[in-house]
Image (cartoon, grey):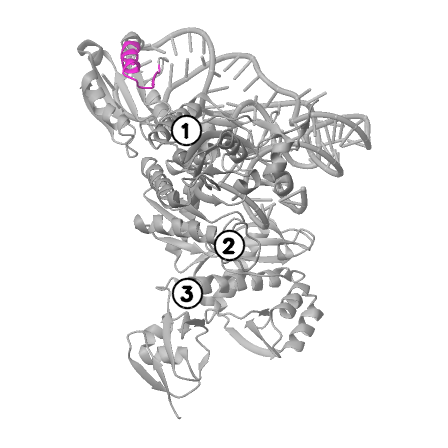
Amino acid sequence: MSHIAVTLPDGSQMRVPPGTTAHEVAERISPGLARAALVAEIDGTLTDLSAPIEGDASVRILTSRNEEALEVYRHSAAHLLAAATLELFPETKLGVGPPTKQGFFYDMQRETPFTPADLEKIEARMRAIAKKDPKNERVWIPREEALADYKRQGEFMKCELVEEKTDEPQVSIYKTGDRFTDFCRGPHVPSMGRIKAFKLLSVAGAYWKGDEKRERLQRVYGTAFFSKKDLRVHLRRLEEAKKRDHRKLGRELDLFSIQELAGPGLIFWHPKGGTVRRVMEDWLREQLVARGYGLVSTPHVARHGLWQTSGHTEFYKDDMFKPMELDDSLYQLKPMNCPFHILIYKNQLRSYRDLPVRLAELGTVYRYERSGVMHGLLRVRGFTQDDAHIFCTPDQVESEVLGCVDFGMEVLRVFGFSQFTVELSTWDGGKGGKYAGTPEEWKLAEDGLFEALRKRGIEASVMPDEAAFYGPKIDIKMVDAIGRSWQLSTIQFDFNLPRRFGLEYIGADGKAHSPVMVHRALWGSVERFFGVLIEHYAGAFPLWLAPVQTAVLPITDHQIEYAEAVAEELRKAGLRVEVDGRSEKIGFKIREAQLQKIPYMLVVGKREAESGTLSVRHRKKGDTGSRTMEEFLDHVRPLIESRDASA
RNA sequence: GCCGACGUAGCUCAGUCGGUAGAGCGCGUCCUUGGUAAGGACGAGGUCACGGGUUCGAGUCCCGUCGUCGGCUCCA
């Protein structure tokens, strides 16, 4: 056979001699494509452009128009980073340098840590190297030679990688220019000059293989994009995220604080944050009642024995606050609400006629998070879950899950999340032996989850072998206003606790049966959900949630009395109102109200006081002109009552 | 918990070579009564995170503790 057939994406075929490279194929299609080409996809696998094609194959040439090429591009950027670092700091030893969702990093070992100034130097050197445009060449060398070379260079991590990743006689090495070689299977962009837009962002600690006991490394983070414009957009988004940081807004808007004297990870809700929370909770409780949940309240501590029955003392020990020793027993601060709800279920003999039993609680729990992991409201030691447990019969499973999914969708809608993704975590089919529950239970539960999503036309990614050991689950991830996604809602089956507590109900047959237990939280926790809301809305809560809905701003001291009267009437109508009676200019008061992100500012001066009207300014629309009190209330009330997320 | 950086007024930050602390905003008082994003003057406000050490002398140098931030790991 003197020629091979190369099939192109449009279905056309090209006959070329064996050993033709993807780059040559690109050249034959068009010189422009060859210039733009970054990487090839041969029979579905990303491959260097320089790789020879030996047999019939389908070939796609990827350029910066193809998202798939970005990962390769960033991987090459990581190599560029390593090459530049070695030039400047030759004593540095290399670990791994993969692309990530947001960019790339390289783990490196060096005695003295890199400083931000070092990063600048490295970045400058990366530019200098890119300018020289060295080729990225893949060469195969004997494994023993690679090991010997790395050993000689003291590259202990590379040695380990070679030993671990391959036992082939030949290993693949990428060479960039004369000095830098990396054990890597690629692929890479043809040359470093192709990397047009990159930036080093930070340096952080890491461990070789993520193991605290191994060598500590420095992970240099960077990001790279196809164009300078894309990079700018990305960096601007990082800036935007910084501006929305709920810790910053929490302070500026006086929503909450964390007090050193009280301890880390413990949240103090200030009146304004507390107001938002109350309004959120009011909505939630209304929903729970309407959806047939029974609202319960349970203690914050319980005897140790309860946690032994539930298994927490055994499996959850490291995450719990240490027990307190009292006269009669050890007591344990609760890390979860489940055992308490189970005790309520168990407190009486249940008939199948009683099921489903849905117990809901805004239950405050305490978990001893490790000291380095706390993060504002998103990761704390004391938090309140919008928790519920549903105990039902096997044939109620599907409709109960459906109810939870619908409730979850309502949470998304009401709080203004128009995008979301869903993950369905299933077991391994019982192969690993690490899961509780019988195959029948798993089938029932997983079918219920699948069926509920199918009925609602919700697309989910199935995550095999990602379930909790006690049951499968659905996780809903909300995508916020700037495209970040947050895992909050979760609907989980639990085959473990009902067994440990010996739960039962009497069926129509007069015999005892085991109920199915579903655990669900939609906000996840009030703290975390609130934190996400702050960032989602950038602190500008919709009218129905805003801690102060309207500010009344008298223009001079002479209108204070009128302003107070207006405020009083609005409060009677149920609005949250503040009067700014300071002797400041109206421009100043408006500025402050704007910075506090108050939805409506009612400016009242001589004209309004005399005519009994209000001059209405909206935080986004600006001055909207003069209204009467009735007109304003008629406008605002429906927005509040409908909980309009966009108002 | 681990690695790194950091901790100065309520907030954001300056403080050189070790010589007992500054600015802006905010706060208070006064002046000003101004029509849609910052009017002016004066004033109060500090255990320089905490504890120890070095030094004639420590915000500054060293050690420890606590906390924060960025990561690792983990997670609602």
User: On the image, numbered disc 1 is attached to which residue?
Assistant: A294
Residue shown at the point (45%, 81%) measured from the top left: A52
Sequence-earlier tag: 3 or 2 = 3
Q: Amino acid at mark 1?
A: Gly
Q: Residue B55 appears in which quarter of the rendering?
A: top right
Residue A93: x percent and y percent?
65, 61
User: Does the stretch in magenta take in A574?
Assistant: yes
> Label 3 vs label 2: CA separation?
17 Å
- Residue at left 64%, top 40%? A318
- Chain at numbered mark 2: A
Q: Amino acid at mark 2?
A: Gly
Residue A116: x and y, percent? 57, 48
**For the view shown, which residue lies furthest in the bottom direction?**
A1
Q: Secondary structure at mark 2?
A: strand
Q: Quadrant of the N terminus of chain A?
A: bottom left
Q: Quadrant of residue A306?
A: top right
Q: Which residue is mark 2?
A: A222
Residue named by callout 3: A69
> Label 1, label 2: how many angstroms apart (C-alpha)?
50 Å
Left or right of A217 on screen, residue A246: left
Does A312 sit left or right of A65 as displayed?
right
Amino acid type of the residue tagged 3 in the rendering: Ala
Q: Chain of mark 3?
A: A
Q: Answer whether labels 1 and 3 touch (C-beta < 8 Å).
A: no
State the residue in front, A204 or B23. A204
| Residues in magenta, as a range | A564-580
